[in-house]
Amino acid sequence: MNYIALHQQFAPQGLFSTDEVRLVFPHFDNRRLVEWQHKNYIRRVANRWYLFQETPLSEPLLQWTANRIYQPSYLSLQTAFAFYNLIPEGVYSFTSVSTRKTQVIHTPLASFVYQHLKPALYFGYQVLRPTPDGSPIDRPVLMATLEKALLDYCYLHPHLATIEDFAAMRLNATLLREQVDPARMKTYLALFDQQRLGQRIGMLRQYINDYA
């Protein structure tokens, strides 16, 4: 297999793994990856993951990358808050939850942070299908629903105990009041089956009532 064959097969998706390459080209020699990096044809993103140099970086591509380089995972926490316009500032790393161990992966593209959730709590995400720049490329992105992102955050941050703690997060209370689905929140909360989490969500509701 030569570079032209690799490019024809994987350039449309941009990001690819050595596992994917071997499925298509079983006799692929990993030494070619080093050669093609030296020629600036591709660049290494993370262990076993590579990106074609000409692939334009975009928010949807980075979100898709976050999902792919550490599986299973879905975007949540601060990244989801930014996606739903709940926080005023940009987020400089991509935060996800995973059933695997907590991990931080620093790459030339961005930093990707993964926090552990037990398998029973791995739910409550939607599949986004962004098409940046009108591209027909299918790069499905797993993103927490608003309600699940809030629950994930409160579950993983047990120090949240007062309305002031929530005020310090600078969440847009008006948008929360408009966008949170109370029925979905109640259903998801019951699945966590944790009394203290329920108390924190009650404090979040009070924050929304006081600040919206």
Image: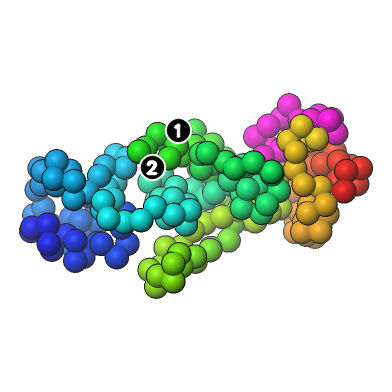
Q: Secondary structure at mark 2?
A: loop
Let me know if residue 196 appears in the view: no
The percent position of residue 196, horizontal first and vertical second, equals: 78, 34
Please identify the residue farthest to the right as the structure is shown: 210
* Residue drawn at 44 percent across, 50 percent down: 62
Say which label, 1 or 2, has the lower sequence index.
1
Q: Which mark is residue 109?
A: 2
For residue 144, side relative to residue 160 (left or right) = left
Q: Quadrant of residue 125?
A: bottom right
In which quadrant of the rendered image does the N terminus lie? bottom left
Relative vertical location of residue 174 with respect to residue 78 in this rendering, above or below: below
Residue type, numbered disc 1: Val
- In-front residue for pair 16/171: 171
Let me know if residue 208 appears in the view. yes
The one nearer the camera, 107 or 20, is 107
Mark 1 = which residue?
104
Q: What segment carries the magenta color?
A: 153-165
Question: Within the image, what quadrant is residue 195 found in?
Answer: top right
Q: Secondary structure at mark 1?
A: strand
Which amino acid type corresponds to the residue marked 2 in the rendered image? Answer: Leu
Position of residue 113 in the picture relative to residue 33 (left or right): right
